[in-house]
Amino acid sequence: MKVHKQTEESALWEAFKQGDKAALGRIYEQYVEALFTYGYYFAKDKALVEDAIHELFVELWRMRANLSDTTSIKYYLFRALQRKICHLMDQETVFSRLVDTANLARDTAPSIEENLIAQEQSEEYKQILSKGLVLLPQRQLQAVHLRFFDNLDTREIADIMGMNEQSVRNIITRALHKLRASFSLFLLFWLLW
């Protein structure tokens, strides 16, 4: 029975990888509830888990031709969702740390006005980062996206981009240097404006 299920899952996965939208629909319908339950266990944030599942399926469809084979779709999806949730939580943490740093020195809870200002600053920091990403050359943007948004390792990125791993590391390093410089420049301009 288990061998038959694995063969069935392998066939469904292969159909999906070949571009069969009905196979994608079957995978989604079959696993979305389990994915939500599993994701909620980690994040305890319904909206974040829903966003992560949506992004996961969009990325799976976009990257389907480059995905590895699997005999357990559920395991594959659970691992991918966990990485996606961690990534989304890391993004929120990075931006909230920038805002929360000013509040660490205070013993009192921030006022409503301070919370609104912090939210506005966080949104502005996100906009600054987005502007920096747009300035990256296409190959650097692709490598950064695959590494930090898709949580792929350098070997996987090298396979996707048709490069060796050292070249991928070099591209990502150069991109991060440019992003740091852009972020500093935009932040300085924003503070002076």
Image: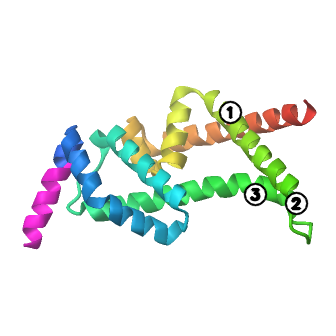
Taking the image as shown, residue 108 lies to the left or right of residue 174, namely: right
Kind of residue sitting beneath label 1: Gly
Instruction: Report which residue position mark 1 lands on.
Output: 132
* Magenta segment: 1-13
Quarter occupied by the C terminus: top right
The number of callouts visible is 3
Residues under labels 2 and 1: Cα distance?
32 Å
Instruction: Report which residue position mark 2 lands on.
Output: 111
Residue at 68% of width from left, 31% of height from top? 131
Rendered view: 177 above or below 139: below
Taking the image as shown, residue 71 lies to the left or right of residue 1, namely: right
In the depicted view, which residue is nearer to us: 140 or 103?
A: 103
Kind of residue sitting beneath label 2: Ser
Residue at 25% of width from left, 53% of height from top? 27
Q: Secondary structure at mark 3?
A: helix
Q: Secondary structure at mark 2?
A: loop
Kind of residue sitting beneath label 3: Arg
Residues under labels 2 and 3: Cα distance?
18 Å
Quarter occupied by the N terminus: bottom left
Rendered view: 173 above or below 86: above
Taking the image as shown, residue 38 lies to the left or right of residue 71, namely: right
10 part of magenta stretch: yes
Instruction: Report which residue position mark 3 lands on.
Output: 97
